[in-house]
Image: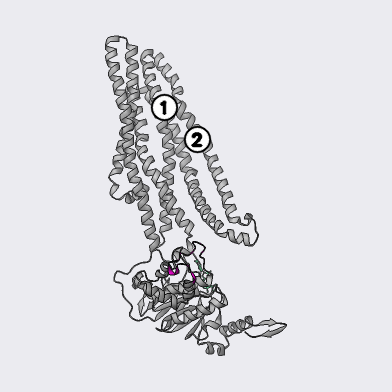
Amino acid sequence: MKTLNKLTHYMGNRKKLFPVAIILSAVSELAGIAPYILIWLIMRELLAGSPVQANGNIAAYALWTGIAAVGSVALYFASLACSHLVAFRVETNIRKESMAKVVAMPLGFFDTTTSGRIRKVIDDNAGVTHSFVAHQMPDLAGTVLVPVASIALIMFFNARLGLACLIPVAIAMAIMGHTMNTRGREFMAAYMNLLEKMNTEAVEYVRGIPVVKVFQQTVYSFKNFYNIIMEYKHTASRYTGLWQLPMSLYTVVVNSFVFALIPVAILLSTGGESLAGVMLDMLLFILITPVFSQSIMRSMYIGQAVGQAAEAIDRLDSMLAFRPLAQSRQPKRPTSFDVRFDNVTFRYPGMTVNAVSSVSFCIPAGKRVALVGASGSGKTTLARLVPRFWEASSGNVLIGGINVKDIATDELMRNVSFVFQNSRLFKTTILDNIRYGRPDATISEVSRAAEMAQCSEIINRLPQGLNTRIGAGGTYLSGGEQQRIVLARAFLKDAPIIVLDEATAFADPENEHLIHGALRRLTRGKTVLTIAHRLNSVTDADEIIVMDGGKVAERGSHDDLVAAGGLYSRMWNEYRQSVRWTLNGKEAKR
Ligand SMILES: Nc1ncnc2c1ncn2[C@@H]1O[C@H](COP(=O)(O)OP(=O)(O)OP(=O)(O)O)[C@@H](O)[C@H]1O
């Protein structure tokens, strides 16, 4: 019921067609029983004698048999047409709504949820609901109605025979119900879990192939993928094993209970009822039984489909349960652009320790603050709280005195440029790639941004200049060149606050020199938060914040921190050691 309620929500304005599909299917199933009764009536006429009257009745029954058979098929088609219209709408709405939610997720959601998982959960589960709504739900009506109508009919003709046939039905249902309710659900969840994991690992596997080739490893190095396939194999085998006995019993009971009833018929006939009468009732029973058995068999598949649909909806819900960024009802616009961390603590979802604790510092507008510290000390986490990748667990991040939570997302994004370590380019033209910074920018504005980011030389060398597609026709850019295109985006965006995360990590010396030049121009007069690993790039920062274990350990200018002789001073000495090298046995300074 819960699953159906949720599916109804996705049906949109085609909701009304759904009961129509179910009713048409039910009527079609009932019409499908009619030919069997009519054939039985024909046989009764034939057995009764009186050929003249029988001929007239038989012709009428035959005509109605044809009408009922054709009508049943036509109604079923009409039902399927309605249910498919609903199912396609459900599928589309699940995809649309889920994607809208995914887009509204905090950017940190994409750190913890792989693209493979997002695709699998949304796409595949939308597909599962399709067959449930288009086929199993309309069939359900017939599956319930046909056995009920058949038994009622048999009861009407012969109550004792009707009651006797309820016994095997009850046994069959009990077998299925028991198997499904005990381990079935549990297995279904495990099975779907494994499918999801296999999908994620498959994506990782394909992504990792270049690394495997470079290091001359065999595919067996992809242990995770291999292990998950084996786990899937074991689970699928155990699942099949679980169903082996109940399924066999069920099939035997459902398909053969007509034979079990023959003794009942014999007992009835010896108990005073006329043999001809009992045989005639048995005939009806034998005619209807295949329809009846088929319905009960179908109920099992429907039961399985209900389980799958419920699991699919739960999976969608649990992935999308990740809270989207709350939007302020009365958003405020910052008019100045200092950035303040006010006693900020943050813990990643599901973790037991804080990534950053009680951090307070301020970057005055137009100044540059650098975050330094060992790997894992919380630099990236802190920087990501500014554009609301995540929401601070406690404390506040403020821009121009306004909490980032109270700034509308598009306004916040307009005011903050985030230059990632691994910003990526899309497989489209350089023009479009730069325009991600500001979609309404004119060509000359894009060209100017490209020039500022030292990209002119790249663009001039490409066959179609700004209109060259990256990744097509042999046009590939080096890591450093890609970073310069990414910087052109930031120039175009011209945001007053810039968060830099290791912007030169992958660049060669020539590119690094160009990128540094571009960065100097980009950050001039802006409020800048830099995450630095190479300490030489931050010696001129207005303030250096030294992070240790998620807390601020020291802060001050480069000279003050070196003079203080603390953690930074040690880091600086280590850094200086690391840039010395031995040439011809002599130590040299770079
Ligand atoms: N998505 C995440 N989920 C859970 N924990 C995380 C996540 N990202 C980072 N952490 C943890 O938070 C802590 C701070 O990590 P963070 O990436 O901020 O450090 P960092 O100083 O930027 O490190 P690096 O210099 O290596 O990039 C670490 O203990 C890290 O393991």
Position of residue 319 measured from the top left corner of the image (x, y, whole percent): 43, 57
Kind of residue sitting beneath label 1: Pro
Q: Which mark is first along the chain, 2 or 1?
A: 2
Q: In the depicted view, which residue is nearer to us: 499 or 253?
A: 499
Task: Decide if residue 203 is in sight here.
Answer: yes
Residue annotated with mark 1: 290
User: What secondary structure is marked by label 1?
Assistant: helix
Q: Residue furthest front?
A: 463
Q: x%, y% of residue 338?
A: 39, 81
Residue 453 is situated, as x and y percent measured from the top left of the image, at: 46, 77
Q: Is residue 425 magenta?
A: no
Q: Residue 263 sits in which quadrant?
A: top left
Q: Which callout, 1 or 2, points to the residue nearer the camera?
A: 1
573 over 188 or under it: above or below: below
User: In this picture, is 323 found above or below 161?
Assistant: below
Q: Which mark is residue 579?
A: none
Residue appearing at x 40%, y 74% in the figure? 492
- Is 472 magenta? The answer is yes
The color scheme shown is one colour
Density class for disc 2 (Cα within 10 Å; few <14, some 14-19, many ≥20) is some
| 224, above or below 130, in the image | below
Per the rendering, the mark at residue 247 is 2
| Residue type marked 2 | Met
CA gap between label 1 and label 2 equals: 18 Å
Q: Main secondary structure of the magenta part?
A: loop
Q: Quadrant of the C terminus?
A: bottom right
Crowding near the residue tagged with mark 1, few <14, some 14–19, many ≥20 C-alpha atoms within 10 Å: some
Q: Quadrant of residue 135?
A: top left
Which type of secondary structure does the marked residue at label 2 adopt?
A: helix
The magenta segment: 461-474
